[in-house]
Image (cartoon, rainbow, N blue to C red):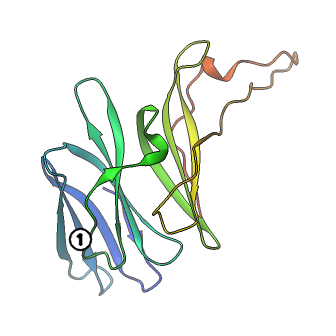
Amino acid sequence: VSVSVDAKGRILIPAVTGVDVISVFISEDRGAQFTEYSLSGEDIGLVGPRLHVRADGGYFLFATRGTEDNFTLVYSRSDTGRQWSDFQQFGPSQRLRRAFLPTHASAGRRDIVVFQAFHEGTGRASYQLYATVSRDSGRSWEDPVLLTGFNEPTPSGTGVRYELFHNQRPKLRD
């Protein structure tokens, strides 16, 4: 689960409540009571829900869809937190393998998402961090940019190739 608090002070908590069901629990009274709103993943096996408040005050709900040999990011949008669009694949992660653990921040009217995915470069395959931006509340996204594709400095000045270690678990703050 994850927890978000919007500008109105509402607490929103998404949780997996079935094999392909995610429920969003919303409290408008500082956590005294919660109302449940459910979305179906339609047999796509969802885990790891993460809810974020968009730059325009609406919401993103990300989840990871798992298969036997891979997993991908999917997301849904909502203006109210009560009614959600159908889950769709998160476009920026479409050409990447094992994308998951998205984090979000807004800057002005832009929504920024950073996530980790498997990088299969010229060296050792590893997890690296990618970023993307939406300027229209998540209706479209820019191509992902590899954030961690730089060599790590060393005292000798030679540097260590980024592919030799994992970069994981991004965290952004507004």
Q: Which amino acid does label 1 sit on?
A: Phe
Tell me the residue at 50%/38% (across/down).
116
In the depicted view, which residue is nearer to us: 161 or 74? Answer: 74
In the depicted view, which residue is nearer to us: 109 or 2? Answer: 109
Tell me the residue at 57%/50% (across/down).
132
Q: Where is residue 149 drawn, in percent x and y?
A: 68, 30
Q: In this view, does 173 lie to the left or right of 41?
A: right
Q: Where is residue 96 drawn, in percent x and y?
A: 46, 32
Quadrant occupied by the N terminus: bottom left
Q: Is residue 133 left or right of residue 66?
A: right
Tell me the residue at 88%/19% (across/down).
157
In the figure, 73 relative to 163: above or below?
Answer: below
Q: Mark 1 points at which residue?
A: 25
Q: Residues within 10 Å of mark 1 (few under 14, many from 20)?
A: many
Q: Where is residue 155 drawn, in percent x and y?
A: 85, 20
Q: In this view, does 93 lie to the left or right of 64?
A: right
Dot 1 falls on a residue whose secondary structure is strand
In the depicted view, which residue is nearer to us: 93 or 157? Answer: 93
In the figure, 89 relative to 3: above or below?
Answer: above
Quadrant occupied by the C terminus: bottom right
